[in-house]
Image: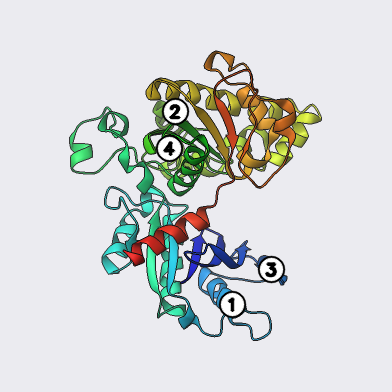
Amino acid sequence: MKILIINSGSSSIKYQLMVMPENEVICSGMIDRIGLETSNITFKTDTVSREETLPIPNHKVGLQKVANMLLDPEKGVIKSTSEIAAVGHRVVHGGSDFSATVKIDEKVKEKIKQLFELAPLHNPANLEGINVAEEIFSSAEQIAVFDTAFHQTMPEVAYKYAIPNYLLTENKVRVYGFHGTSHKYVSEKAINYLKDNSKIITIHLGNGCSMAAVKDGKCIDTSMGFSPSNGLIMGTRAGDIDQSVVFYMIKNLGYTPDEVNAVLLKQSGMLGLTGYSDLRDIEAEAEKGNKDCLLALQMNAYRIRKTIGAYAAALNGLDAIVFTAGIGENSSYMRNLICTDMDYFGIEIDTGKNELRSKELREINSEKFKVKVLVVPTDEEYEIANQVFQLLEN
């Protein structure tokens, strides 16, 4: 079965065509900087690698370009869009309505639209990807895989806020959690490696960052909440902040609510602290002695260490911590900073192992301590394809 995976972001589209259940990747690629004159398009197979820079004004044009590359008579990989049995869409916020992967119909699309305000950077782009894919791949089943679904196993004590009960019962205000597809994939890989249903903390570090406490394969707590904006320090998002700051900015500093929202989502985090949002730039500046960058990295690691401590308590023990995503997989600097002075929890990194680079699951902990420190490359596209395949097969 050929399944096309679409991860539609606010200004990007990641895609991958797979054959399931063989887990064979036929092609993959990305379109970024959508809406600019310098949009970049990549297309890769085992034998072909293409890259173009050209204007892509919107997601519809972008997905049509993807279809054209898939169908290219010389370098394409299919002869007709009818060869694609299903299109799997990553959808960031599923609210309390979706705890599993679903076939998309008009009711599902309306629910996704109702959640725009809770995930304004993601859900609108996700829905746009669905609408365009329905036109271009009209014979395929359209399937939604929700980032929030994995976290639906959290107990009420973890997902409920200490606010009036009616806000939960009538308005569904609660902790939802995000990056669930990634947390699910890497926790299952870790459990398989450990050969036990273990007590694991998964740490997804990219432009967006989140952590999850996973016990016996199920999420019992996570750092993001009602929206993907709180918890850890992120590329441009502030993470946890005293709500009084919001009211102070509005009442005393003259900000509008929309302006405060823009500051906290798009101008804060590592960008607000350093002037840079890309961790590679921040690490390079820190090595040159930039005090703002060094402090920002230390703040980032400090908040992660605090959350490790909290989740070790929630799990009543700890067998492994798992680093994943762009920063988690590639930054030995951040992994070392996070795991420094954690010996009380049985966590210590082997410096030599930490510096090794690999695309495989690897163990980087010191042999002196019992807690495993694992680097597990995430594969959200495979996880989406697998969930789509399981849904259609069953």
Q: Nearer the viewer, mark 1 or mark 2?
A: 1
Residue at image position (30%, 69%) is 105
In this view of the protein, can residue 276 be seen by the observer?
A: no
Labels 3 and 1: the sequence-earlier one: 3
Q: Nearer the viewer, mark 2 or mark 3?
A: 3
Labels 1 and 2: the sequence-earlier one: 1
Residue at image position (64%, 22%) is 367
Q: CA distance from mark 2 to mark 3?
A: 52 Å
Colour scheme used in the picture? rainbow
Q: CA distance from mark 1 to mark 2?
A: 49 Å
Q: Secondary structure at mark 4?
A: loop
User: Residue 287 bears which disc, if any?
Assistant: none
User: Residue 70 bears which disc, if any?
Assistant: 1
Mark 3 = which residue? 46
The type of residue carrying mark 3 is Asp
The type of residue carrying mark 2 is Val
Mark 2 = which residue? 245
Above or below: residue 108 compared with residue 221? below
Mark 4 = which residue? 224
Q: Secondary structure at mark 1?
A: helix
Labels 3 and 4: the sequence-earlier one: 3
The type of residue carrying mark 4 is Met
Q: Are marks 3 and 1 in contact (CB under 8 Å)?
A: no
The type of residue carrying mark 1 is Leu
Q: Nearer the viewer, mark 2 or mark 4?
A: 4
Labels 4 and 1: the sequence-earlier one: 1
Q: CA distance from mark 3 to mark 4?
A: 37 Å
Across and down, in percent, residue 190 comes to 51, 38
Q: Are marks 3 and 4 in contact (CB under 8 Å)?
A: no
Above or below: residue 12 compared with residue 75? above
In this view of the protein, can residue 217 be seen by the observer?
A: yes
